[in-house]
Image: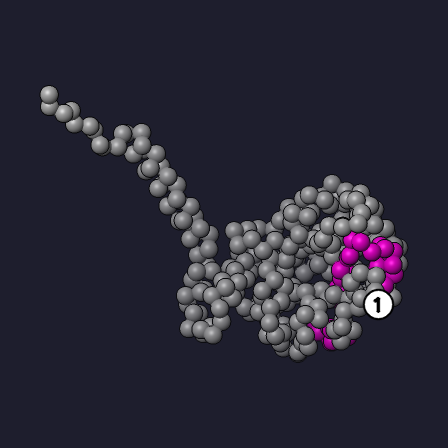
């Protein structure tokens, strides 16, 4: 008996599924290319000028350029600490020709740690036409009032300075989340009572969503999100730290770059008056 030939051609359904998957992947690629068109154009147009830098650095510089162009009405700022070493503040004024409007400086960490460059940076900023602010790196497993008192002893805020900033990034190892939140509230209340202005809270977007959003609804938030796909301010972020690998003339190595979601007048309204 002759052997019956089997049909080796793919069915209509399998061909449709393959075509749909291919179309989906192509759509995602095209969407990514469109979303990052400014960064790609920036990279290829300036590639010859940065041959000594790593590809990753090129990408970060392109991201900074892209977001500056995407948010022309937002204000640009940086934040610094001893990790940037000695800064030549005479050179610090802009990124990609966009003026730097504000600088946040780390002052203290935990209950007993002063930033090694705070006093130098803080004093240097008095000669710049840039709004300055100071922040405290909070250690969850240390006494909150001792941390607040260290910040108060270290930082003298003046008219025109931004409110004090509480930087919380880590979860506690020796206490519950409820105890952490109570400690944060004690720090915020102690510092607000001393300076007469409500502090700003800095944190990562996930930390904000998971732990802070519900319990601190009335505070101004400075939120970090470095995701390359993110093009707009995170939810409820007044300040957005969008990269930790920015380049600024006068500063060696990487620096955090931020955007403020408002006008110069609005930023002035945030300051101590």
Q: Which residue is mark 1?
A: 154
The residue that appears at 53% across and 54% down in the rendered structure is: 228
232 and 229: which is toward the camera: 229
The residue that appears at 71% across and 68% down in the rendered structure is: 81
Occupied quadrant, residue 37: bottom left
- Which quadrant of the figure contains the N terminus? top left
Task: Give the color scheme: rainbow, by chain, secondary structure or one colour.
Answer: one colour
Label 1 environment density (alpha carbons within 10 Å; few <14, some 14–19, many ≥20): some
Residue 173 percent across, percent down from the top left: 76, 50
In the image, residue 171 above or below residue 4 = below
262 and 201: which is toward the camera: 201
Residue 195 percent across, percent down from the top left: 86, 59
Question: Under tag 1, what secondary structure?
Answer: helix
Occupied quadrant, residue 111: bottom right
Question: In this view of the protein, can residue 213 be seen by the observer?
Answer: yes
Question: Is residue 122 covered in magenta?
Answer: yes
Farthest-out residue, left: 1
In the image, residue 246 above or below residue 31 = below
Question: In this view of the protein, can residue 69 be seen by the observer?
Answer: no
In the image, residue 60 above or below residue 29 = below
Residue 41 percent across, percent down from the top left: 42, 62
22 and 271: which is toward the camera: 22
Question: Is residue 85 covered in magenta?
Answer: no
The span picked out in magenta is 121-150
Q: Is residue 178 left or right of residue 211?
A: right
The residue that appears at 77% across and 57% down in the rendered structure is: 138
- Which quadrant of the figure contains the C terminus? bottom right
Q: Is residue 257 left or right of residue 127?
A: left
Occupied quadrant, residue 135: bottom right
Residue 29 percent across, percent down from the top left: 40, 49
The residue that appears at 35% across and 42% down in the rendered structure is: 22
């Amino acid at each position: 008996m002759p052997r019956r030939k089997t049909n080796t051609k793919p069915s209509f359904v399998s061909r449709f599924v393959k075509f749909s998957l291919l179309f989906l992947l192509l759509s995602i690629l095209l969407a990514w290319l469109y979303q990052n068109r400014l960064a790609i154009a920036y990279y290829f147009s300036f590639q010859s000028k940065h041959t000594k830098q790593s590809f990753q650095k090129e990408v970060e510089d392109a991201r900074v350029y892209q977001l500056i162009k995407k948010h022309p009405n937002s204000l640009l700022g940086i934040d610094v600490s001893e990790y940037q070493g000695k800064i030549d503040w005479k050179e610090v004024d802009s990124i990609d020709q966009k003026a730097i409007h504000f600088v946040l400086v780390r002052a203290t960490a935990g209950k007993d740690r002063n930033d090694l460059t705070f006093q130098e940076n803080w004093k240097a900023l008095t000669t710049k036409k840039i709004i300055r602010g100071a922040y405290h790196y909070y250690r969850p497993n240390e006494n909150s009032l001792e941390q607040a008192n260290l910040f108060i002893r270290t930082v003298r805020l003046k008219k025109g300075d931004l409110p004090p900033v509480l930087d919380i990034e880590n979860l506690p190892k020796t206490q519950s989340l409820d105890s952490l939140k109570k400690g944060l509230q004690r720090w915020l209340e102690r510092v607000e009572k001393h300076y007469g202005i409500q502090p700003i809270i800095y944190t990562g977007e996930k930390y904000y969503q998971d732990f802070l959003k519900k319990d601190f609804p009335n505070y101004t938030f400075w939120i970090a999100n470095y995701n390359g796909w993110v093009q707009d301010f995170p939810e409820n972020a007044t300040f957005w730290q969008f990269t930790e690998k920015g380049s600024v003339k006068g500063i060696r190595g990487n620096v955090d770059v931020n955007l403020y979601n408002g006008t110069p007048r609005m930023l002035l309204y945030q300051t101590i008056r």
